Image: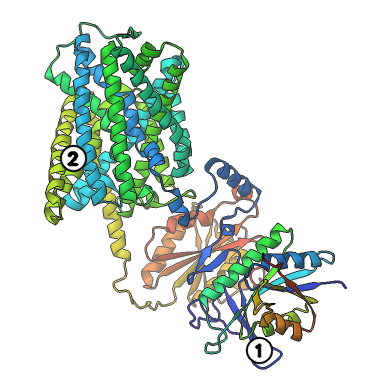
Amino acid sequence: MQLKRILVPLAGTSVDPEVIRVAIGLGKPAKAEIVAIHVIEVRWNLPLDAILEPESERGEGVLDDAVKVAEQAGAHIETELVQAREAAAAIIDTARDRKSDLIVLGMPFRKRLGRVYVGKTVQGVYVGAHCAVLAYRQEETR
Amino acid sequence: MSDRGDNGRKDNPDAPSLEERATHSGTKIGDRRVRIVRPAASEFRRHGGHYVATTRVDAPQGKLGRAYQGVRRVLFGARLTSEEEAGERLSKKTGLAIMASDNISSSAYATEEAMRVLAIAGGAALALTMPIAIAVCVVLAVVILSESRVIRAYPNGGGSYIVAKDNHGVIPGLIAASALLIDYVLTVAVSSAAGVAAISSFIPAVHDHRVLWALGLIALLTLGNLRGIREAGVIFAAPTYVYIVSLLGLIAYGVFRILSGDVPDAVVPRDAFEPEGLELLTPLIVLRAFASGSVGLTGSEAIANGVPNFKPPESRNAVITLVWMGAIFGTLFLGITYLATRIGIAPDQSELETVNSMLTRSLVGDGTPFYFVVQISTAIILLLAANTGFSGFPRLASVLADDRFMPRQFAFRGERLAFSFGIIALALMSAAVLAAFHGSVTELVPLYTIGVFAAFTLSQSGLVRRWWRLRNPGWRLSMFINSFGTIVTGTVLVVVVFTKFFYGAWMVLLVMPILVGLLYAINRHYTNVHDSLTLDRPDEPIPRLKPPVVIIPVARLDRATLQAVAFARSISPTVRAVHIATTAESAKEFDRRWKRWTNEVPLDVIESPYRSLLQPLLRYIEAIDKRDDRPITVVLAEFVPRNWWEWMLHSQTALRLKLSLLFRPNTIVIDIPYHTEDTGHGVTPREPEDSSQ
């Protein structure tokens, strides 16, 4: 399968740099276009296009770091900052609009009640995406 | 799609912004999303409700720019952000090296300067050097005690200038500031001259080119300081401590030899003073020797002036450094003076060798490694002393610039957070003084001490008034200390002025009032400008202006003219073009072409029989201006060539006209550049053609 467009949602967790490197590795053979996306979830009591300064700043920081990781790996990536009510839906719709072949999701290693915890965004994208989805779980921390 | 401004308000939708928000519908109802598009995100980052320019904004473009930037990086180091200032602060150890080096290094020549005056009265008079040194140290102790009060009362620095201005008023403040500015310039000049003198003591060939050597040293210091104060401290801290340790070692060794009865033979100077003396030993000579020896007190104000340079707690660290400085200087000065007088060292009339060099040679022998350690570390610490001027002058100048007494440029911090403008100004002035006085320490010293004692006296007396006014707990003790300080420093000032007046002190007394007047005049200018620019109230409404009268000087009918006319019509319906022709034929020809091209913009053609261009244009603009009360706007079409060297092939008429109109009131000048790659922003000429002009 030739990967032409890869979408990499980033949440600003410790797994982000690894996910970027994985996406670059996967996209290298076909020189795929890689887009890193950060979704700011807007609470229902605020308008969707509300100016959320701290969240926007954090989002830009997450995407800037991603660009730096990509540059270190010798690749160029695009970035996109999005505000939506629910991250999963926004990721799926962005992937559809951008005609992405693959979504690479990162999961930080977390446990709840003794089991590895998979967040609702990862579950939502896994279930709802039209394209292939790769979930990269971080190595267990000791 | 919705466009919003940075504050969440609905802005003019036509106004471009650094951020656009586009709403996209989702697959399901309620899955709408807003895409935040920031095309210049890598150059302007959001932070705390505003934009912060990133390093990419300053990144040079083009090979030449990158090469220039590369050279700057090598010379001055990487740029520092404003937030990194705290990291540039000084610890007590580096603070001592940077700020106290001036005072400590005075021990390298203070003994000699006192001896040189006494030697005029004969060899026997040199015995008075020790009592004079003790008197100088007593004054130093008083100064240090008083300066520690200054630091506690004014932890934000500024030193004598701030203290005098706050408590005595603006003019005394400016007198203190001028005195200090002059003194910092002299610190650099004297210290670099003395540094070269130390080198020439063991490399005599240097003496013949001492001005050039000293200028080279000033250049080196300028470069070091432009890199930033912390790096300057790191570079120079080690030699300061080497000097202190080696001199203390020398003194300990000398005292040991004397106490053990092994007094060495004194090295005889190559050009000795007359042993019988040329003058009688009078009180005046003793006072002059004291005034010359007081050169050792210079530099003790630098710490009080630069308190904010220290790491927190700034005041405490500054006071500790000040006390250390006094203790070290006192020990070295008294030790050197004791050994020199006890062994019988006499100064060299032609400054061929320093007293310290002869003393070291007498004790440890000629050409021994220890001799070179002492001489080299002396030369280096004298350079560091010059560095005190580099840390004091720019900071004081920035404080004065903030108070609008000096040009604003002195308050700007460079890429390395150093006050680059002040550093360069100081370097140039001290180089000029050094060259004017042929790099001679003895010629420069009479100018030196007046400034510092004038500043001391003003700040001490200022504090007396402050304690009296505030009457805080413990005010009586503080007032007593500062009153005593005022009397002591004031007395020394009078002695220095009186005894050194004809030896060069008159120059300082002449320059100081001129400088005060200059600072005052600068302040008046800034105050006038401020008064005329300040809004009467914070919610001042934006005035509504009528569209201006637009005049377009036209040289020829081409794409650049077309673009300028199109722009002029976009800002006002009242547009007139004017063409200066050199002959009647070319005037008629241009008028014909213009009318064939457009009837929408009236054209005035002026024939200039003497081929002058600017004057007829300026008179025309004046004539139009008199007939209409609306502001005149001159729209200039300017062709911008692709390469810099192509500039020389064009007459630069637009540039000359811009300069002529720069100071004309009620006139707005708008430049419409036309680049060769421009397409006229969608406007196409109906008849592009060249006129004969």
Position of residue B29 relative to residue B350, above or below, is below
Amino acid carrying mark 2 in the image: Thr
Q: Residue at x 83, y 72 (%)?
A: A3
Q: Residue at x 40, y 40 (%)?
A: B93
Position of residue B158 relative to residue B348, above or below, is below
Q: Residue at x 34, y 51 (%)?
A: B313
Residue linked to disc 1: B31
Amino acid carrying mark 1 in the image: Asp
Judging from the image, mark 2 belongs to the subunit labelled B
**Gap between marks 1 and 2 measured at Cα:** 76 Å
Q: Position of residue A40 (x, y in %)?
A: 60, 79
Of B120 and B124, nearer the camera is B124
Residue linked to disc 2: B457
Residue B255 located left or right of residue B276: right
Query: Residue farthest to the right?
Result: A1
Secondary structure, mark 1, is: loop
